[in-house]
Amino acid sequence: MKQLRKDGRDGTANNHRAVRNSLIDYFGRETVSVNKITYNFLLSWERYLKTDREHVRGGNQGQEVKTIEKGKKKSGIYNNMRDLRTLFNAAKLKYNDDELGICRIRHYPFIKYKLGATSKTKKRNITLEQIKMIRDYQTDPLYNTLVFGKRINWELTDH
């Protein structure tokens, strides 16, 4: 993850950290053998990711912070599994050396476990007419910005 951050890939590093934290929560310990990542584990972890769960993390000031995380939807599960597969592949590259016949990680659970497709994200773009309406909107000087924001939101949404 440090190298990802050095490469300016903070989003990917954050995703990988989230997967690591989720595995720590699932297994209840800081380190997990790569041999625990099996097809049956992937099915079980997928069910786990779908549930609401509580976890405790160290906060910025050293105190523990308890959070409740909602169960993940289809796209969130897909992203977690994709990132775990990426981490698993990186471990295979690091610890195996086919040229020298070194094969410490022999199994590959993602042969049987298929990620499937992500769900389509609902289109959230606004129209050109809506942009022009925002641009050209004339406010009464008596209205404060909060009322202005509420009025624009009401006019842009389908009601």
Image (cartoon, rainbow, N blue to C red):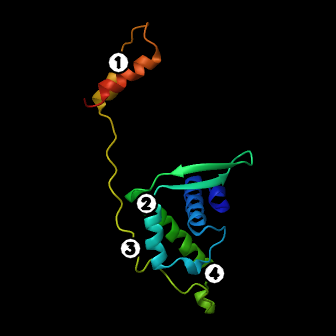
- Mark 2–mark 4 distance (CA, rounded to whole Å): 31 Å
Of labels 3 and 4, the one closer to you: 3
Q: How would you rate the neighbour count of disc 1 (Cα within 10 Å): few for under 14, some for 14-19, many for 20 or more? A: few
At mark 4, the secondary structure is helix
Going from N to C along the chain, the mark reached first, 3 or 4, is 4
Q: Residue 101 location, x and y as percent?
A: 61, 92
At mark 2, the secondary structure is loop
Amino acid type, callout 2: Lys
- Mark 1–mark 3 distance (CA, rounded to whole Å): 50 Å
- Mark 2–mark 1 distance (CA, rounded to whole Å): 45 Å
Q: Residue 58 location, x and y as percent?
A: 69, 52
Q: Which residue is mark 1?
A: 136
Q: How would you rate the neighbour count of disc 4 (Cα within 10 Å): few for under 14, some for 14-19, many for 20 or more? A: few
Q: How would you rate the neighbour count of disc 2 (Cα within 10 Å): few for under 14, some for 14-19, many for 20 or more? A: some
Q: Which residue is mark 3?
A: 114
Amino acid type, callout 4: Tyr
Going from N to C along the chain, the mark reached first, 1 or 3, is 3
Q: Is residue 146 above or below residue 65?
A: above
Q: Which residue is mark 2?
A: 50
Q: Which mark is residue 57?
A: none
Q: Quadrant of residue 94?
A: bottom right
Going by the picture, which residue comes out furthest to the top?
142
At mark 3, the secondary structure is loop
Q: Are marks 2 and 1 in contact (CB under 8 Å)?
A: no
Amino acid type, callout 1: Asp
Going from N to C along the chain, the mark reached first, 4 or 1, is 4
Q: Is residue 9 visible?
A: no
Q: Is residue 143 above or below residue 122?
A: above
- Mark 3–mark 4 distance (CA, rounded to whole Å): 24 Å
Q: Which residue is mark 4?
A: 95
Of the pair 156 and 28, the residue shown nearer to us: 28
